Amino acid sequence: MNVVKIGQFIKELRKEKSFTQKEVAERLNVSEKTVSKWETGRGLPDLGYMLPLCKLFGISTNELLSGERLNDRQYVEKAEENIASLVSDRTSPRKKVIVSTVSCVMATLSSLALVLISAYFINELWLRLVLIGIAVMVVVSDVAVILLVAVSTEIYECERCGEKFVPGLSAYLFAPHTFRRRYLKCPFCKKKSWDKSHLKK
Ligand SMILES: [Zn+2]
């Protein structure tokens, strides 16, 4: 999602309708400053203002978020893209961590249950193997989710030079670590140290 493009689009639409920023602000019950912030790409309209804004200009939210008018084919393509980026932009890193932790705990418990059920209640060997196979797959995908969330939300601060960096996937997998620190090679000073993790933003 390109905030600057969206801003320019809002400005164009406003001029087409020959509104001033003040008139748009009055109709939406926001300050003139807010409208100017949208137009210069310094901020996206809050979800609550998107619909009224689109109604005022006679466009869809999908077009607003794409920063241009869309034909039928583009419409579907852009819709998915825009929904995905809205969700990821508005979900804070902390929330992502909580959601992924909870879902991983649930998945781990349910795969444990599967293993127990297959051990105690299922006599057919093949069915047991299938259930255990499913349990293993659930655990593996759990680990993948934890890793992806960690990579997308954590940033490390070098103990030696203080620079911040995001380690690669293999560093996450293989570097020794505690809950808050990881033994990583800093890409700036090239030295290894126990670096502290922070959440992005
Ligand atoms: Zn460093």
Image (tube, rainbow, N blue to C red):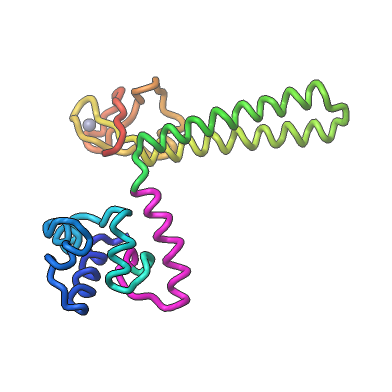
Quadrant assignment, res 32: bottom left
Q: Nearer the viewer, residue 160 or 61?
A: 61
Q: Nearer the viewer, residue 21 or 136?
A: 21
Q: Please provide percent x and percent y for residue 24.
A: 18, 66
Q: Is residue 150 magenta?
A: no
Which contiguous range is marked in magenta? Answer: 64-89
Q: Please provide percent x and percent y for residue 64.
A: 32, 66
Quadrant assignment, res 156: top left
Q: Please tell me whether residue 72 is drawn above or below residue 66 in the rendered image.
A: below
Determine the residue positioned at 85% across, 30% down. Answer: 125
Instruction: Count every numbered label the image shows and give the total.
Output: 0
Determine the residue positioned at 44% across, 71% down. Answer: 75
Task: Residue lying at the far right in this picture: please name it.
Answer: 124
Q: Where does ligand 1 appear, by image quarter? A: top left
Q: Please provide percent x and percent y for residue 21.
A: 13, 67
Q: Nearer the viewer, residue 15 or 144?
A: 15
Q: Is residue 87 magenta?
A: yes
66 sits left or right of 29 in the view: right
